Image: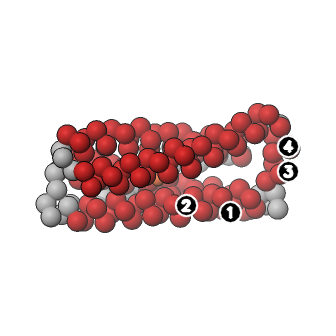
Amino acid sequence: MKGSQKVIDCLNELLAGELMARDQYFIHSEMYKDWGYEKLYTRIHHEMGDETEHSRQFIARILLLEGTPKMVPEALSIGHDVPSMLKADLDIELKVRDNLKKGIVLCEQENDFVTRKLLVEQLLDTEEDHAYWLEQQLRLIDEMGLQNYLQSSAA
Ligand SMILES: [Fe+2]
Ligand SMILES: [Fe+2]
């Protein structure tokens, strides 16, 4: 089913963000594992799976609309310690949120309500799961201090 080229281009931009988020969670989860922060590893490894599924949904939708998925991730921003990693991940989620919102508006203009539904579902995941959890962690670090937070994050 031929889709709007504007929607396909938008989906490709969103796909680049999901692939980047997936890769960033991939490296960050392995860093947590290497440092012995098992709980952070488990959570972020799970997040990598979520972003892989988001990417898969975009790829499938682009193919259905007879477009070509561009498998090129945006540039990563890899942190160097736990707070900078959490912050870098939150920055990604907030950027993804803004891009999803723009995409939703575009889908309405182009009358593509099925793609719109897909974007709304990912927006829900982004706001209420990923970004919310990262904001909670940064708040916990503020309130309990970094060392206490790190102690609670180790196995
Ligand atoms: Fe995502
Ligand atoms: Fe996410």
Q: Which residue matches tag 3? A: 151
The amino acid beneath tag 2 is Met
Q: Determine whether the residue tagged by mark 4 lies in a helix, strand or loop.
A: helix
Q: Is mark 1 within 8 Å of ligand 2?
A: no
Question: Crowding at label 1, few (<14), some or many (≥20) Cα neighbours within 10 Å?
Answer: some
Q: Earlier in the sequence, mark 2 or mark 4?
A: 2
In which quadrant is the N terminus drawn? bottom left
Q: Which residue matches tag 1? A: 42
Q: With respect to residue 18, does 1 lie above or below?
A: below
The amino acid beneath tag 4 is Gln
Residue 113 visible, this angle: yes
Q: Determine whether the residue tagged by mark 3 lies in a helix, strand or loop.
A: helix
Q: CA distance from mark 3 to mark 1?
A: 15 Å
Q: CA distance from mark 1 to mark 4?
A: 19 Å
Q: CA distance from mark 2 to mark 1?
A: 10 Å
Q: CA distance from mark 2 to mark 3?
A: 23 Å
Q: Which residue matches tag 2? A: 48
User: In the drawing, does residue 136 fall left or right of residue 70?
Assistant: right
The amino acid beneath tag 1 is Thr
The numbered mark at residue 147 is 4
Residue ranking furthest to the left: 2
